[in-house]
């Protein structure tokens, strides 16, 4: 009888501690910023690439601009050892993951890694299903700071429960980790993941085009920039986003083959939408144009604003959507996204508009308050909301302004 009572008590304690587990507080209070290997390199990852990328993040000015996570996506894995511990591919990572984390940390940066809630990852490597606590402990021993957790090979699993299990495992391991939920939005993670992860994907994978759907063999698709922006517009997901819990519109494709204006629009909209700013290009060899987009400190400040309010689309003027984002200290970010290929001439009379937030208690009436209008691409003040602002939004491009309260 005593033995049975002990077992029951043990189960009760385990259940109680598991229920009380939480994600790590104090992380991702603003959207995470960093780099991920997948968009440009896929499975072609190795130790040299990660070290060189960490070096480039410092040398290019990206670290100074706020980028801090160097994230290895799929295909770093070796086999599990005889005790079930996950290992690295020794040919790709001969020094081991702990040594690589130490190198990245020595640069003042943080190292991220990838796993999957299923038996295998999307590329067919060992997933974490059934090994969640063991893997989390291994990541802690390696010094991992960020975990992207995918959703391939998950037949029979419920998303919320699967991600809670890994959240609890990370908590038990004790090393603070940003937990990025990559469930593609199919189970509406914005409705349940606030206390599970720090960010959650709202769509399938991104593709480097402005407005397209790229269909893969097997019946799944990758999506262009505007397709992802549109994907959840009818579900009003912005109300679920905020400090420590962000809607993730996927890693960026800036510098991966789109036109300059399309890259600008992509970057600025991710900033407006409070998406994590995770670069997906080869930052070791990027053009000066790409570097200037990715390190534009005034656009980054819109994304990193401590108020943490995601933008909403206020109206559409012909082909151009007007997006509004409340900022700290009463300022406002306003973006004009031109989705046509033709330039759009706009004469915007601010005093004819009241920006009323549909989900939060913000309202901006330009007949009552004057704002200075600052162009965030040029870094110049161009007028006041007391007068109309004339400008051209090029085709497949975006103009972004900060309205500074006077």
Image (tube, rainbow, N blue to C red):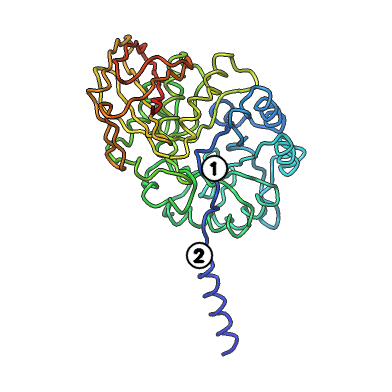
Left or right: 186 in relation to 124 = left
Question: How far across and down, in percent of the image, does residue 324 sit?
Answer: 34, 29
In the rendered image, which residue does mark 1 sit on?
148
Q: If you read the primary sequence from the N terminus, does the residue marked by circle 1 or circle 2 appear first?
A: 2
Q: State the SS at label 1.
A: strand
Residue at (51, 49) in percent of width and height: 118
Q: Quadrant of residue 63?
A: top right
Camera-nearest label, 1 or 2: 2
The answer to which of 331 and 24 lies nearer the viewer is: 331
Question: How far across and down, in percent of the image, does residue 8 sit?
Answer: 53, 80
Distance from the alpha carbon under mark 1 to that under mark 2: 23 Å
Left or right: 157 in relation to 70 = left
Pointer 2 local density, CA inside 10 Å: few below 14, some 14–19, many at least 20: few
Q: Is residue 102 visible?
A: yes
Q: Check the image and report above or below for 178 versus 62.
A: below
Pointer 1 local density, CA inside 10 Å: few below 14, some 14–19, many at least 20: many
Left or right: 223 in relation to 100 = left
Quarter of the image with the C terminus is: top left
Furthest residue toward left? 352
Q: Is residue 214 visible?
A: no
Furthest residue toward bottom? 1
The answer to which of 330 and 393 lies nearer the viewer is: 330
Question: How far across and down, in percent of the image, does residue 175 sit?
Answer: 64, 53
Question: How far across and down, in percent of the image, does residue 199 sit?
Answer: 47, 43
Pointer 1 with pointer 2, Cβ within 8 A: no
Left or right: 333 in relation to 12 = left
Q: Quadrant of residue 7?
A: bottom right
Q: Check the image and report above or below for 182 versus 208.
A: below
In the rendered image, which residue does mark 2 sit on?
20
Residue at (47, 32) in percent of width and height: 303
């Amino acid at each position: 009888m005593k033995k049975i009572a002990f077992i029951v008590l043990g189960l009760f304690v385990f259940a109680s501690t598991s229920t009380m587990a939480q994600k790590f507080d104090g992380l991702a209070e603003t959207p995470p910023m960093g780099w991920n290997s997948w968009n440009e390199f896929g499975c072609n990852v190795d130790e040299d690439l990660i070290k060189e990328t960490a070096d480039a993040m410092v040398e290019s000015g990206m670290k100074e601009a706020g980028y801090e996570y160097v994230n290895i996506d799929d295909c770093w894995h070796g086999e599990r050892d005889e005790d079930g511990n996950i290992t690295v591919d020794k040919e790709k990572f001969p020094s081991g993951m702990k040594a690589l984390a130490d190198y990245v940390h020595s640069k003042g940066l943080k190292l991220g890694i990838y796993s999957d809630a299923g038996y295998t990852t999307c590329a067919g490597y060992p997933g974490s299903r059934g090994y969640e606590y063991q893997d989390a402990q291994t990541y802690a021993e390696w010094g991992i700071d960020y975990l992207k957790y995918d959703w391939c090979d998950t037949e029979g699993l419920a998303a919320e429960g699967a991600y809670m299990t890994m959240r609890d495992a990370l908590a038990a391991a004790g090393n603070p980790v940003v937990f990025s939920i990559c469930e593609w939005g199919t189970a509406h993670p914005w409705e349940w993941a606030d206390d599970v992860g720090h960010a959650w994907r709202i769509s399938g994978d991104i593709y480097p085009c402005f407005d397209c759907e790229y269909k893969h063999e097997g019946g799944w698709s990758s999506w262009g920039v505007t397709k992802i922006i549109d994907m959840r517009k009818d579900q009003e997901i912005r109300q679920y986003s905020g400090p420590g819990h962000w809607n993730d519109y996927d890693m960026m494709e800036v510098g991966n083959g789109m036109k300059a204006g399309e890259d600008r629009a992509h970057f600025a909209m991710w900033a407006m939408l409070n998406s994590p700013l995770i670069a997906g290009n080869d930052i070791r060899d990027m053009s000066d144009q790409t570097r200037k987009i990715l390190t534009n400190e005034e656009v980054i400040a819109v994304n990193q604003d401590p108020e943490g309010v995601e933008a909403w689309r206020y109206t559409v003027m012909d082909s151009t959507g007007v997006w509004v984002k409340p900022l700290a200290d009463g300022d406002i970010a306003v973006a004009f996204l031109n989705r046509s290929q033709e330039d759009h001439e706009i004469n915007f009379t601010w005093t004819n508009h009241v920006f009323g937030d549909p989900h939060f208690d913000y309202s901006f009436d330009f007949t009552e308050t004057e704002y200075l209008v600052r162009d965030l691409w040029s870094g110049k003040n161009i007028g006041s909301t007391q007068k109309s602002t004339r400008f051209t939004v090029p085709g497949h491009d975006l103009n972004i302004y900060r309205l500074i309260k006077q």
